[in-house]
Amino acid sequence: MTSLKKLLLGEQGLVVIFALAFLVVSLTVPNFLTERNMLGLLQSVVTIGIVACTMMFCLASRDFDLSVGSTVAFSGMVAVMASNATGSILLGLVAALICGGLVGTVNGVVIARFRINALITTLATMQIVRGLALIASDGRAVGINDPSFYQLALSRFLGIPTPIWVMALFFVAFGFLLNRTVFGKNTLAIGGNPEASRLAGVDVARMRIWIFALQGLVCAVAGVLLASRITSGQPNAATGLELSVISACVLGGVSLAGGRAAMTGVIIGVLIMGIAENVMNLLNIQAFYQYVVRGLILLLAVLLDNLRSSAAGRRA
Amino acid sequence: MQDFLEFRTISKGYPGVQALSNVSFSVKKGAVHGLMGENGAGKSTLIRVLSGDQSADTGEILIDGKEQHYRSVRDAFHAGVIVIHQELQLVPELTVAENLWLGRFPGKAGVIDRQQLIGVVSKKLVEIGIDVDPSVKVASLSIGERQMVEIAKAVMLDARVIALDEPTSSLSSRESEILFALIDRLRANGTVILYVSHRLDEIFRLCDSLTVLRDGKLAAHHPDISKVTRDQIISEMVGREIANIWGWRERALGQERLRVEGISGPKLRQPLSFSVRRGEILGFFGLIGAGRSEMARLVYGADARSSGTVSVDGTLIQADSPPHSIRSGIVLCPEDRKFDGIVQGRSIEENMTISSRRHFSPFGIINPKKEGALADKFIAKLRVRTPSRRQDIINLSGGNQQKVILGRWLSEEGVKVLVIDEPTRGIDVGAKSEIYEILYELAAEGMAIVVISSELPEVMGIADRIMVMCEGRVAADIPRADFDERRILAAALPDVQNANTPSHAQAR
């Protein structure tokens, strides 16, 4: 019993849970372990996976961002509308990145400089930005004029769709950023103890603004890929994304109290979310039930986090 | 009188540490029993086992001859054992009376009987002699008053054993005296008090008997405290004789290094000026609230200045923020290590290199080899006791944490001015000497050091010069040759009438 507990709550606990779940699902669910389904699964988690990279930084520094879903929808919208208007996909992408980065920067400045609670701030911007997306599109989906925009999501490299490559690239890049750079270590330090970090010479306010700005930029990338995949800018896209992303991060061992995060954990968290949804689809479980399951996974994740930190506390 | 509380062969291990091994001793009814030992000696673990927060691996606790098998704080509670921790467990937004009734409000059908609520409490408070209005919110009370309320709560719950963990660590000397008087009354009622403290003065003032722990083992048990001496207890705690823990020696002083001119801030209204020479250790002494820590934070730029300038080696420092100060060679080891110093949950290495890592991180990419080598260098140089640089800093004792913070600044190389606020608060005797030794070495290398301390013997022991602060201004500037306990204390006390208080009336 205790060794099982140790295994599940320890450093590698998540990997073990994931491996077990994967094995069970592969053996019991028909059509799960096929190339087509695997690629489909990965493609379905691209948005969550990409946004989780920066959400991890956000949570690790003791912050919170609820506005990611809205930002994804808004920047996807901007990308489509700007490229339709200018006839240049590149300009569309740049516009989307600018808008995403701007939303993130505003979040960061309000939170870090004006010292407004991150939950409240991003709850507000979540609604404001969703509103902007609706206003810009008059509430309707905006179709893509230039078909080569589709190619962002449809193109393949070595048989694997580009968005999956982008996600993989982000995983590697942000894993490096977290573990091997001053930025990453300072993020963890801020989450561990903001005041001590400030007195140790870390410019906490600037770090937080950067983290949110980065989050906005990354949301824009996710938004563009999403728009390309659904072949339009949808003002109602990615609703509830923030919850899935936070669930994935927490499931991946990112502490909501800050100071603890690992990229591998987040990747596994994202995959667990994806597998759960994929399996439910394969088993033809009604979409309504999927909400319940997603909620249960989140609860489980928080519970695990709690058990893990009390186990860590006992070790100390 | 018979033994009322007995620990029998208590052992408790954590992975990698045997926190307690075979600890046995007993306390008589109506006795105040001191529990001493260096940090990490096992006091906290013993208290935790007593409180039911953790259970012992082996051994048992007996209360009034009965073996106790409680598994939770609640069980301990029912057995009449209440532990009052340093972090008080009161709800600030509730009134004193509400706090005392918390969990079992008097009344019917969920409607609180306000008369009983206040009435019973005020009677109880008068009975045990606590002068606090039961209808005010706890948030409006001083720390000392909150401590009283916490004790009153224990008394309301009919506690037969009350354990106090460093109760005076944040009390003024007046508040401490009130607390001691209360403890005397509880003793007269037959309550057993287990009193954990670092302060020998208090132990001798209060305790009837004493246990000293060392490395998780019973180092000494004194059923009658009048038969032991201070030096004996100190050597029992550290296991060796410490001749002179200060070890101050003459040093050559150089030119002026730090110059502070008329600084003031929101919490330090009157402009303050002073200077420190190369190789000099300047001590700041004063009562709590005299403005010493505020001064330190202003010098370092931790808080924004409203006026004044700081210059190092004659060069004015342009802005006031920690990054600017660090780059100009001024660093601060803050007063409250836990909240302002260490980053919990991160490794010793990361805590040490948090600032200096920018030096070996081109484009912000850390060189892990250099980082590890730097951390190892200062772990060795400062004799930080740890199995590895990757240990979570929270696992270190206070003294070793302080060394890591010092390492954080020494690894910066160009430090010219070190401001260290309460260098040895909560640090055991052995590690104290080591930290003083480090300060002397740094001073000898030409650093200007500002030491702030509430412990008069400490400031007098290690400083070359003392500035006494009182109510936000400098009350005296005394060179080492003229150090005199009474004179310094007199200058620190706001009211001249109080200048003749006996020397045990310490700074806090």
Image (spheres, coloured by chain):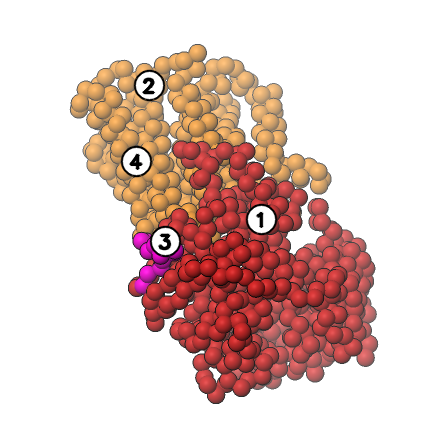
Chain colours: A orange, B red
Q: Are marks 3 and 2 in contact (CB under 8 Å)?
A: no
Q: Horizontally, is B477 left or right of A210 in the view?
A: right
**Region rendered in magenta:** B308-319
Q: Position of residue B408 (x, y in %)?
A: 51, 48
Q: Which mark is residue B393?
A: 1
Q: Which mark is residue A281?
A: none
Residue B238 visible (yes or no): yes
Report the residue at 58% width, 21% height from top.
A26
**Dot 3: element:** loop
- Marks 3/2: CA–CA distance: 46 Å
Q: Horizontally, is B175 left or right of B194 in the view?
A: left
- Marks 2/4: CA–CA distance: 20 Å
- The question of residue B506 being in magenta is answered with no
- Marks 3/4: CA–CA distance: 28 Å
Looking at the rendered structure, whether the residues under marks 2 and 1 are on a common chain is answered as no
- Marks 2/1: CA–CA distance: 47 Å
